[in-house]
Amino acid sequence: MTVNLPQLRAFLAVVDTGGFSTAAADLGLSQSAVSHAVAALERELAAPLLVRGGPARTTALGERVLPYARSALAAVDAVREIAADGADTMTGTVRLAATPTVCQGLVPGLLRHWAQSLPRVTVRVFEGDSAEVADWLENGTADAGVLIDPPPGPGVRLAVDGYRALLPRDHPLAGEAVVDVRDLEDDDFLLSPGGCEDRIRALHGRAGLRLDPAHRVRDLATLISMVQAGLGVTVLSEVSRSLVPPDLVLLPVAPRAARHLVLAGPRGRPWHPAVHSLAESAAALTRTRSGTAPS
């Protein structure tokens, strides 16, 4: 059996982009070249790896092969990046996973910083909920992730992200310095399911309240629009502040609550060398913003 890296790379590109044409554009190849590479891999394995038609998806065999293909390519890329790092010419592509609020409120600043400090490293962003981010980091879909309150381990803390009440500017509590969640009992509460739901429920529990949301809204833009329309109030993290329009206010809540945002690589395997460089650069940025000197 002869399986080569271009075949694996074509297979992964089709899986990650959802189609042969987009994979070809991503790899800088013709669609025919990608199709032939995947077909050659399937011939070597004597079974199909992908279901054609519509968005490409993996067969049962393809799903089993996928993590090994990712590991093989990650190892080869890591060897190349280690050599590049030794020559002080770090290059490569890093797939970064993060939740929607982090993607919209924190990641753009990081990308601008990395573009200046590590111009030869390309960062591609994958947006998902907290569970998806953790899964992608575990199975190799992502090389790095911005994790929320992860267990102790290697990583760079990017922010301590406090929770805030999102209210219309004409709300009776909009002028308060701090909003007690008990004072929002008479308002319809809009809840965004996902990574923050457990923390928001715990916040209400600490105040002796049982959270019974009027609406559950996954999309952050929809959630904000519903608060604008006067359909209720919600609690968001501070990192969302840049997304808040002028007719809404984002105020600290009591009881106080916060989450820690940590940039990290996978726990069970070596980090992509470029992830180490991104983490070191992010740590320097965080120190600069907090006014602390490097340790």
Image (tube, grey):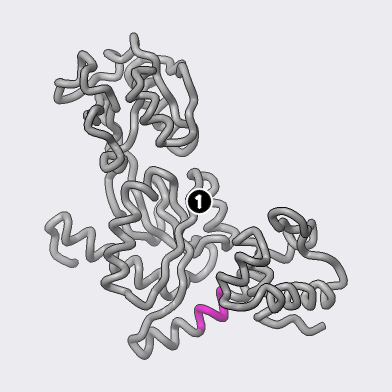
Q: Residue at x 36, y 53 (%)?
A: 262
Which quadrant of the structure image shows residue 207?
A: top left
Q: From what the image shows, is residue 219 above or below residue 201? A: below
As for residue 23 lying within the magenta part, the answer is: no
Q: Residue at x 25, y 24 (%)?
A: 254
The quadrant the N terminus occupies is bottom right
Looking at the rendered structure, the kind of residue marked 1 is: Val
Q: Residue at x 33, y 59 (%)?
A: 156
Q: Which of 238 and 284 is in front in this view?
A: 238
Coordinates of residue 268 in the picture (x, y in percent): 54, 63
Give the tally of numbered discs. 1
Left or right placement of residue 132 versus residue 88 in this view: right
Q: Residues within 10 Å of mark 1 (few under 14, many from 20)?
A: many
Residue with the mark numbered 1: 133
Coordinates of residue 155 in the picture (x, y in percent): 37, 60
Q: Which of 118 and 78 is in front in this view?
A: 118
Left or right placement of residue 136 versus residue 57 in this view: left
The quadrant the C terminus occupies is bottom left
> Which residues are the magenta region?
74-79
Q: From what the image shows, is residue 169 above or below residue 34? A: above
Magenta stretch secondary structure, dominant:
helix
Q: From what the image shows, is residue 183 above or below residue 82? A: above
